[in-house]
């Protein structure tokens, strides 16, 4: 039972990301809507859902255990989030500065080649399509990485299935 739960977790996260990405891709690419439109649609749906649930709970005299107005994020959590963001932006800025000055020729040519390839891809397909393909590749990578790290779990799961099939015969 624990092995099937592990398999569901391994497959679940990338699939949720892939489904969410597909919905964003549909909204932005096929409907020709902007990301701002997508975010406003999501907030409207969430607001309406919460309003309906609030009215339902009030009608049924159900007390909500947590008041959303009392939700807070700790100062340490906020500091760590922004420190991580600042470190990421700082590292990217540092790499681009070194590449722009020309001190590291190999890095400079890597950056120029990557930008040229992205420019060529951008002429052929839309940016939303490139982002969606990147998301699909990321999900595929996550699936492969999880299946390799949990290979013994998957092997045991498939062995049990084969055992049950042979017992039924």
Image (cartoon, rainbow, N blue to C red):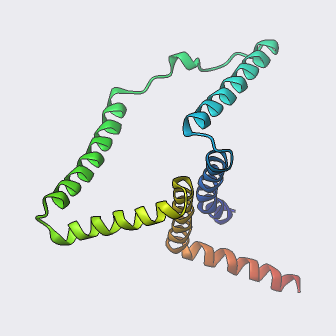
Q: Which residue is drawn at the image coordinates 56% and 67% (left, top)?
A: 140
| Residue 31 location, quadrant | top right
Q: In this view, does 99 lie to the left or right of 86?
A: left
The structure residue drawn at horizontal position 59% and vertical position 53%, both measured from the top left corner, is: 17
Query: Quick one: 3 or 13, which is closer to the camera?
Result: 13
Q: Which image quadrant: the C terminus?
A: bottom right
Camera-side residue of 5 and 58: 58
* Quadrant, the N terminus: bottom right
Give the mark count.
0
Q: Residue furthest right?
A: 169
Q: Which residue is drawn at 56% across and 71% down?
A: 147
Task: Please state the horizontal and vertical placement of residue 118, each as a whole percent of the image.
Answer: 41, 63
Residue at the far front in the pictured view: 123
Pick the residue in front: 104 or 153: 104
Question: Between residues 132 and 43, which one lies in front from this camera angle?
Answer: 132
Q: In which quarter of the image is residue 162?
A: bottom right
**Horizontal arrangement in the rendering, residue 143 relative to residue 62 (left or right):** left
Measured as percent of width and height from the top left, residue 108 is found at 21, 66
Is 151 drawn above or below residue 130 in the view shown?
below
Q: Which residue of the protein is positioned furthest toward the left in this rendering?
A: 103
From what the image shows, is residue 157 above or below residue 37? below
Query: Residue 129 in the image: x percent, y percent?
Result: 57, 57
- Whether residue 129 sits left or right of residue 88 in the image: it is right
Please tell me which residue is depicted at 35% across the width and 31% down the height of the picture: 78
């Amino acid at each position: 039972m624990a092995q099937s739960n592990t398999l569901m977790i391994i497959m679940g996260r990338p699939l949720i990301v892939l489904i969410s990405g597909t919905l964003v891709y549909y909204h932005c690419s096929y409907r020709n809507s902007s990301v701002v439109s997508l975010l406003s649609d999501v907030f409207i749906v969430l607001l309406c859902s919460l309003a309906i649930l609030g009215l339902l709970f009030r009608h049924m005299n159900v007390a909500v255990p947590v008041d959303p107005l009392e939700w807070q994020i700790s100062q340490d959590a906020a500091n760590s989030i922004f420190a991580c963001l600042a470190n990421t932006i700082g590292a990217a800025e540092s790499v681009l500065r070194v590449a722009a000055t020309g001190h590291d020729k190999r890095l400079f040519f890597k950056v120029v080649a990557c930008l040229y390839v992205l420019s060529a891809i951008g002429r052929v397909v839309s940016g939303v399509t490139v982002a969606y393909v990147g998301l699909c590749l990321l999900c595929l990578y996550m699936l492969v990485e999880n299946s390799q790290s949990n290979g013994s779990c998957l092997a045991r799961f498939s062995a049990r299935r084969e055992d049950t099939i042979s017992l039924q015969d």
